[in-house]
């Protein structure tokens, strides 16, 4: 439970900081923000779209985007999805409801996990063609986080629609199959240092971890091969670690034995 | 239905699906044609939309809470900043903090240059509705004129004989479109129930005479033609055919 609780605390604290902290501490929102009136942080995916749309980029946007890019690309991997993004609260709740109601996978809607990469590329191409940051125009992440941070209620309906899609239409449809921002972070996270370490010798092959993982394909080697979770698609939520009764999984930051895994 | 539990499950699921679908449908059906004003420096809407990252830094920077980020239900593109002059106008801060904070230059920082400043802004144009402006009724009111930060330049008072009474003067507010920046202070100040002076986006208001007209008795106006495009081609046959082989 501890990672789950920690994640909820971090997710809510970040939104609360943006919403309530004095502007001397932080201004803006998850798209772009200014900390302590000096440090810019920006969503690198949005910045990339803006670059393609306008073929120009402001220095402070570039600096902010680079900082976030390096933070996730070098250290944290796709942790944004599990620890920061407010949509994760909704989709996790949806999958909780789905599990409690015992809904089985839909036979009508079968989505490929690669769909999101297609959407990622489409977004970038369209941004260039239409001269507009396309994903930002309808980004549910933007709508929900701005709604929470700047007040108002209409965002709640968007959140509800996401809940409905994930709970009743297709399991984990939004984050694991559709979201181009998740795909973007997955793409840049392959070589990030924070990884889930796996010990085959301790594993009793109960597959509880695979059961709970929101991105099951990254655990394909469980029970077969002594190998850490290497895929960038792992959102570093730590659910697998919590659920493992045999201590076969753990977080590792600096993997010194990288060569023999 | 096998049992009550199953029944509730299915009902709940159906209810949620219907709720979600009807929300999406209501969004799709809502075709808003309302106007809205953009913050300082966002003149060219196309340029602005290609740059705005929808971060709200301008919103946070404005000391008057003028700016809002559009929600899904607002007329402006969701997440982009806008303001409504009758609620809170732009007070034309000397240092224009909204532009200063914008990380993407969507609010064009050319206005921050010392030789530019607030007078180079183009948020909109004020339009007087002469039917409801009480000054046109002969009542002495110059609320908007006094509220204008560019008084006597953007907003002037013109006098005119009051034909109705035949012995009074009308003191009419008149907007100079070349000077008005569209801050909306006049709209806020207007005393009528619904503002008789309104700030509208420039694209709603401004026309274009074209290069084929030159101001009479104005030597300099001919210079405009130097930059004009010479690409325009007339179909010369069209005219002759109409005259020669028409059914006239
Ligand atoms: S110039 Fe000042 S009042 Fe006007 S929108 Fe910018 S910050 Fe607000
Ligand atoms: S600060 Fe600039 S990028 Fe951010 S919302 Fe305002 S106009 Fe858009
Ligand atoms: S909008 Fe009104 S107050 Fe502002 S400059 Fe124009 S005429 Fe003056
Ligand atoms: S404040 Fe309103 S009513 Fe008064 S002169 Fe101006 S536009 Fe007319």
Image (cartoon, coloured by chain):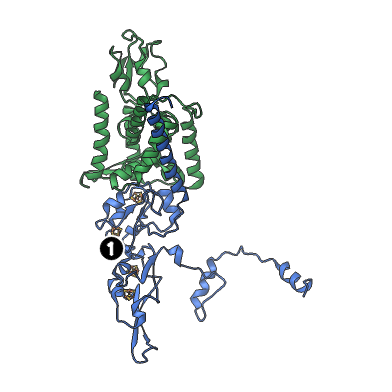
In this rendering, position of residue A127 left or right of residue A58: right
Give the residue at x 37% y 55%: B108
The quarter holding residue A4 reads: top left
Residue B31 lies, in percent from the top left, at 46, 54
The quarter holding residue A105 reads: top left
User: Label 1 belongs to which residue?
Assistant: B91
Residue A13 lies, in percent from the top left, at 24, 36
Chain displayed in green: A
* Quadrant in which the N terminus of chain B appears: top left
Q: Is residue A85 above or below residue A58?
A: above
Give the residue at x 46% y 46%: B25
* Quadrant in which the C terminus of chain B appears: bottom right
Residue A183 in sight in this render = no
Give the residue at x 44% y 53%: B47
Residue B34 lies, in percent from the top left, at 42, 59
Residue A160 lies, in percent from the top left, at 37, 39
**Label 1 chain ID:** B
Q: Is mark 1 within 8 Å of ligand 1?
A: yes
Residue A8 in sight in this render = yes
Dot 1 falls on a residue whose secondary structure is loop
Q: Colour of chain B?
A: blue
Front-lying residue, B102 or B123: B123
In this rendering, position of residue A5 left or right of residue B52: left
Front-lying residue, A192 or A4: A4
Front-lying residue, B221 or A134: A134
Q: Residue furthest bottom?
A: B167
């Amino acid at each position: 439970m501890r990672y789950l609780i920690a994640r909820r605390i971090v997710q809510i604290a970040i939104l609360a900081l943006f919403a309530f902290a004095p502007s001397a501490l932080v201004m803006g929102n998850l798209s772009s923000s200014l900390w302590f009136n000096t440090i810019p942080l920006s969503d690198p995916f949005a910045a990339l779209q803006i670059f393609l749309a306008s073929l120009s980029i402001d220095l402070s946007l570039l600096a902010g985007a680079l900082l976030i890019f390096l933070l996730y690309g070098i250290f944290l991997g796709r942790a944004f999805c599990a620890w920061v993004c407010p949509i994760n609260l909704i989709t996790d709740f949806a999958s909780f409801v789905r599990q409690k109601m015992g809904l089985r996978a839909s036979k009508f809607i079968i989505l490929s996990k690669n769909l999101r990469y297609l959407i990622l590329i489409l977004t970038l191409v369209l941004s260039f063609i239409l001269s507009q940051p396309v994903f930002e125009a309808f980004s549910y992440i933007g709508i929900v986080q701005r709604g929470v941070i700047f007040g108002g209620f209409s965002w709640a309906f968007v959140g509800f629609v996401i809940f409905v899609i994930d709970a009743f239409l297709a399991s984990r449809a939004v984050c694991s199959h559709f979201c181009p921002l998740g795909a973007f972070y997955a793409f840049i996270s392959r070589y990030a240092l924070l990884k889930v370490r796996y010990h085959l010798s301790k594993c009793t092959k109960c597959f509880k971890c695979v059961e709970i993982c929101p991105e099951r394909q990254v655990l394909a080697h469980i029970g077969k091969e002594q190998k850490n979770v290497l895929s960038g698609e792992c959102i570093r939520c730590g659910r697998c670690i919590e659920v493992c009764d045999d201590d076969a999984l753990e977080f590792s930051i600096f993997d010194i034995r990288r060569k023999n895994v | 239905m096998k049992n009550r539990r199953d029944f509730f499950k299915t009902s709940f699921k159906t209810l949620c699906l219907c709720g979600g679908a009807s929300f999406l449908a209501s969004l799709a059906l809502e075709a808003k044609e309302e106007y809205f004003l953009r913050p300082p420096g966002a003149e060219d809407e196309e340029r602005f939309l290609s740059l705005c990252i929808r971060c709200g830094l301008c919103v946070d920077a404005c000391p008057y809470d003028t700016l809002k980020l559009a929600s899904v239900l607002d007329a402006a593109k969701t997440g982009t900043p806008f303001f409504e002059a009758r609620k809170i106008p732009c007070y034309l801060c000397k240092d224009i903090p909204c532009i200063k904070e914008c990380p993407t230059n969507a609010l064009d920082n050319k206005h921050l240059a010392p030789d530019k400043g607030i007078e180079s802004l183009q948020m909109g144009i004020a339009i007087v509705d002469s039917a409801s402006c009480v000054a046109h009724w002969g009542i002495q009111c110059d609320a908007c004129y006094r509220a204008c930060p560019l008084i006597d330049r953007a907003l002037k008072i013109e006098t005119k004989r009051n034909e109705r009474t035949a012995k009074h003067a009308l003191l009419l507010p008149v907007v100079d479109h070349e000077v008005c920046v569209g801050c909306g202070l006049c709209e806020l100040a207007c005393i009528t129930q619904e503002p008789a002076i309104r700030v509208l986006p420039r694209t709603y208001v401004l026309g274009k005479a074209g290069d084929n007209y030159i101001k009479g008795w104005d030597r300099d106006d001919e210079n405009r033609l130097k930059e004009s495009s010479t690409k325009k081609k007339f179909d010369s046959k069209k005219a002759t055919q109409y005259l020669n082989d028409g059914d006239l």
